[in-house]
Image (spheres, rainbow, N blue to C red):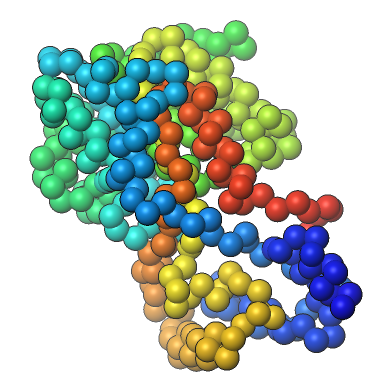
Amino acid sequence: MALQLRRKTHESIIYIDKDSAPRIMPFGEDFIIEDLPIGTRVIYPNPPIKGLPNREAAIRYAVNHPLEMEPLYALLEPGMRVTVALDDISLPLPPMALPDMRQTMLEVVLDLCAANGVDDIHIIIANSLHRKMTEWEMRRMVGSTIHDAFYPDRYYNHDAEDDEGLVTLGHTRHNEPLRVNKRAIESDLLIYLNINLVPMDGGHKSVAVGLCDYESLRAHHEPQTIRDSDSYMDPPKSALNHKVIRLGKLVDENCKVFHVETALNNKMFSDGYDILTRNEDEFSFADRLKWEAMKRTFSNLPRNARRKMLHAIPAQYELIGCFAGSTEPVHEKILELNYRQYEIPVKGQCDI
């Protein structure tokens, strides 16, 4: 009874008692099962928010009903230069099952561009100073149809070291410099397609960080910013966020940016593997059989094979919200969904 009372504090928090089941825990490229000491607090992810039934329809609705901007179709005119920038594959992790959300967003945006006579379109991966994506990765992310139509001349990685392809926008009042992708910033319209998995991503960070150079990045990707931040996942208490907002406003002063942001749920595993994020006390007989089969399979594989197997399982993320339009109101709506999915009220730090 005491355990049940404790569990009512939040559905994702349990305390170990003498009748609790052993816990499954990640261990490198493996999993182990352990009996934890009585009284141990264990925190699980919130259950996935149910995904929207038609993600293409949700994206189309968002771009036709934007926040604090005209609908996308009203911003498009024949002869204009449009650049579509999108997140690289540093997120989401693990990589999502196909079709990738960026492909669906691109299909909607490119359809609207074609319908409004816009054919000067470049697609730029906002990889900042991350490694450049390979052609195979680029094809997987947007699908073969878009890849074949635009690659390599009009679908490419941002190059943070190409001086001729960068333009300086100036400095913030804190003397933070900003130099960004020239094609993107000099376009008549910059459309940014974002996948928001955690609260530190999206918003002003998309363009000001994703399309900048090294000198711009070093103003905030450095130890002092880490020390000055309580958490990158709590934007009001993040020095990184405050710096990025200042830089992002420089972007908005120099370029018309139409943001399309998406929030995903936390459905990392398919139905066969979802036991890895659930409370072991609630396992059914079938769940226990799944775990035994998984454990036996992993124990018989060499380490490299286990790693390859784990990395080959695509995440089953689902769209739970899409908003489009001006930078800040769009990002505020997406953050609300992030917190609904991920936030768990916890008092005190965890040991592990």
Q: Quadrant of the C terminus?
A: bottom right
Question: Picture coordinates of residue 124 (x, y %)?
Answer: 28, 33
Would you say residue 84 is visible in this rendering?
A: yes
The picture quadrant where one finds residue 71 is: top left
Residue at 55% in and 11% down: 172
Q: Nearer the viewer, residue 203 or 113?
A: 113
Q: Is residue 200 above or below residue 170?
A: below
Count the marks.
0
Q: Quadrant of the N terminus?
A: bottom right
Q: Please give the name of the residue rendered at 41% of the width and 62% of the height, measured from the top-left corner.
A: 316
- Name the side, left or right, on which 25 lies relative to 134: right
- Residue at point 61%, 47% (across, down): 340
Q: Position of residue 87 (x, y in %)?
A: 38, 39
Residue 244 vs residue 45, the one in the foreground: 45
Residue 159 in view, yes or no: no
The image quadrant of residue 32 is bottom right
Q: Would residue 225 appear left or right of 202 to someone viewing this image?
A: right
Q: Does 344 sit above or below residue 80?
A: below
Quadrant location of residue 192?
top left
What's the residue at 52%, 89% (across, down)?
286
In the rendered view, tell whether residue 155 sits above or below residue 288.
above
Where is residue 243? Give x, y as percent.
59, 22
The one of 214 and 311 positioned closer to us in this rendering: 311
Residue extending furthest right? Answer: 2
Residue 197, placed above or below residue 235: below
Could you tell me residue 139's position as x and y percent? 21, 50
